[in-house]
Image (cartoon, rainbow, N blue to C red):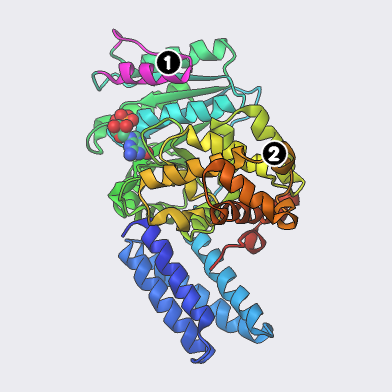
Amino acid sequence: MVLADLGKRINNAVNSALSNSQDDYTTTVDVMLKNIVTALLESDVNIKLVFSLRNNIRATLLESKSRSVNSAQTKKLIQKTVFDELCHLVDGETQPFLPKKRKQNVIMFVGLQGSGKTTSCTKLAVYYSKRGFKTGLVCADTFRAGAFDQLKQNAIKARIPFYGSYTETNPVRVAQEGVAKFKKEKFEVIIVDTSGRHRQEEELFQEMVEISQVVKPNQTIMVLDASIGQAAEQQSNAFKESSDFGAIILTKMDGHAKGGGAISAVAATKTPIIFIGTGEHVHDFEKFSPKSFVSKLLGIGDIESLLEHFQTVSNKEDTKATMENIQQGKFTLLDFQKQMQTIMKMGPLSNIANMIPGMGNMLNQVSEEETTKRMKKMVFVMDSMTKQELESDGRVFIDQPSRIVRVARGSGTSALEVEMILMQQQMMARMAQSTKGGQRGPGGMPGMP
Ligand code: GDP
């Protein structure tokens, strides 16, 4: 079962519990938990974690019931408890290392061949470079023919300085020289790609240890292919023993992988997942946070990831203006339009749609082509609005319904379609309101069931 289905099933379980007025409270909770547990197990989520989740939710709900006085409070309690426990399920708990500005941060990548290591190195380099870090890439993979060419091509395309050698066969030396060169040139983030092997073998681990000794990484990141499901736990444990990595990047979360399996397995190793790869394109890379992941899983949308993502792909000025608005609790139609335009320039739209509150569910049932078409329409609609309307909070349309009709006519859409966009923007504006001052949590989940 892919993650979208899992999210839907959990939502359904919670929704039927919320609308059930026939059974007593304990029975309602137990039926809901049975459905959630079945859905999680069928998604390959780690069994120990699933049962611990069930017990925690049950204990919290039964214990707190007496404190919630009316059914609205009970509903909120059920939503919040399920949300919190799902976050807990995928949370590695320890905090990962974060590079510091004006310092020299060396990050070393390890992982099996084919896991997506080289691709993820470039993605991470782009991520930090976009955030103002002077970033360089070192290719210390001398094992696989063509590895340097691949990194070089990726780096050139992404305009990231790189270092590697066609003649030197000793990966330790290449790593050492590359890091020394970038350090001398005052690079702030230096990412070292190492060789992979098809299997976990002695030679690979030995090489990793040697490279690590010379480059002295501030952080070692292991790259794991999410499609291996629960085997992720065993693989990360094996790597952990020889290269004490402090963080994980899970790749190929876009496929039909049982991503829930990999995430929960990794969470069981108490190592934080810091990013997930959601495609082959350099921007198909999302910062992983349990809250964002669960929000997307449940189709609530996640404005924080959306902003993170936009920092990587969009025009700095536009993002800054939107960020300022959101910090003030505002989200105008213009913010919405700029974001949509950026989205249109990017890779698979369904990845992005899932971050927008309410949109994931709306577009889940349709093809990628249809998603693109619908999103384009949204941009056309906003193109037909006046500057004042765009800079407004959208409520001007409530006072002037005739404008809705005009905008619909101007953009070749229907009044209903315009209204849908306004609703969407209002939902985002409410989220912005709840994000104001750094508040989050259940207040920031307006779309929840
Ligand atoms: P390495 O051997 O570990 O360095 O792996 P590569 O970076 O060469 O990646 C192996 C293959 O996986 C390539 O075809 C990549 O384009 C692909 N790949 C890497 N990350 C992702 C991802 O997040 N999603 C998808 N769909 N493919 C990916």
Q: Is residue 140 above or below residue 203?
A: above
Which residue is rendered at x = 62% and y = 80% of the image?
Answer: 74
- Give whichever of 60, 336 is nearer the camera: 336
Amino acid type assigned to the residue bearing label 2 in the image: Thr
In reply to whether residue 152 is colored magenta, the answer given is: yes
Q: Secondary structure at mark 1?
A: helix
**Which corner quadrant holds the N terminus?**
bottom left
Q: Position of residue 43 (x, y in %)?
A: 33, 62
Q: Which mark is residue 156?
A: 1
Amino acid type assigned to the residue bearing label 1 in the image: Ile
Spatial separation of the CA atoms under disc 2 and disc 1? 40 Å
Q: Is residue 116 above or below residue 257?
A: above
Count how many numbered circles sit on residues in the image: 2
Answer with mark 2 or mark 1, whichever residue precedes in sequence. 1
Mark 2 or mark 1, which is nearer to you? 2
Q: Position of residue 448 (x, y in %)?
A: 56, 65
Horizontal side of residue 11 vs 429, given as left or right: left
Q: Secondary structure at mark 2?
A: loop
- Give whichever of 192, 22 is nearer the camera: 22
Question: Can I make out residue 383 in this image?
Answer: yes
Quadrant hosting residue 178: top left
Q: Position of residue 159 (x, y in %)?
A: 48, 17
Q: Is residue 65 above or below residue 13?
A: below
* Quadrant of the displayed image that contains ligand 1: top left
- Give whichever of 337, 95 is nearer the camera: 337
In reply to whether residue 312 is colored magenta, the answer given is: no
Please give the residue where the numbered disc 2 appears in the rendered image.
386
Which residue is rendered at x = 29% and y = 52% of the image?
Answer: 231
Q: Which residues are magenta?
A: 146-168
Horizontal side of residue 195 vs 412, given as left or right: left
